[in-house]
Amino acid sequence: QVQLVESGGDLVQPGGSLRLSCAASGTTFSRYFTGWYRQAPGKSREVVASIAGNGASNYADSVLGRFTMFKDNAKNTIALQMNSLKPEDTAVYYCNFRGPEGNFWGPGTQVTVSS
């Protein structure tokens, strides 16, 4: 059974940094799509960053240049380094995996950017 667990969410001041991590069990990330999504109160879930099975990465325009996604195939983890955080980055962040077993989500981790 595939399980994803995020960690690293916290309360941070504007301009600060956070690093989110997502660990997987029951599958292997290496050749498949992984992504970070977020959902703010009253808004739809949106993609933040992704790495395709071929290694190609994509970022939402709103985070380009501030966020970087990493994938560690040996540890079967992905991470999201978030710098220069803004109040509008406040949301629950979810990791996502799409592979032969299906489409899976972690339970989410809360990121709050506020002074």
Image (cartoon, rainbow, N blue to C red):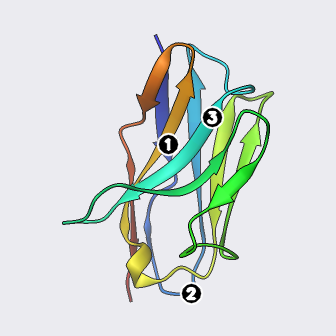
Helix, strand or loop for disc 2: loop
Q: Which mark is residue 46?
A: none
First in sequence: mark 3 or mark 2?
2
Residue placed at 49% from the left, 87% from the top? 14
- For label 2, count other residues whose C-alpha is less than 10 Å away and answer few (under 14), some (14-19) or many (20+): some
- For label 3, count other residues whose C-alpha is less than 10 Å away and answer few (under 14), some (14-19) or many (20+): some
The answer to which image quadrant residue 40 occupies is bottom left
Residue at the limit of the structure toward the left, as seen here: 42
Q: Which residue is mark 2?
A: 15
Asked if marks 1 and 2 touch (Cβ < 8 Å), the reply is no
First in sequence: mark 1 or mark 3?
3
The correct choice, above or below, for 7 with respect to 13 in the image is above
Residue placed at 53% from the left, 50% from the top? 36
Q: Position of residue 58 (x, y in %)?
A: 67, 57
Q: CA distance from mark 1 to mark 3?
A: 11 Å
Residue placed at 54% from the left, 28% from the top? 98
Q: Which residue is mark 1?
A: 95
Q: Position of residue 50 (x, y in %)?
A: 62, 49
Q: Position of residue 7 (x, y in %)?
A: 50, 46
Identify residue type, mark 3.
Phe
From the image, state whether disc 1 or disc 2 is nearer to you: 1
Left or right: 40 as drawn, with respect to 93: left
Q: Position of residue 95 (x, y in %)?
A: 49, 42
Q: Which residue is mark 3?
A: 33
Q: CA distance from mark 3 to mark 2?
A: 30 Å
Identify residue type, mark 2.
Gly
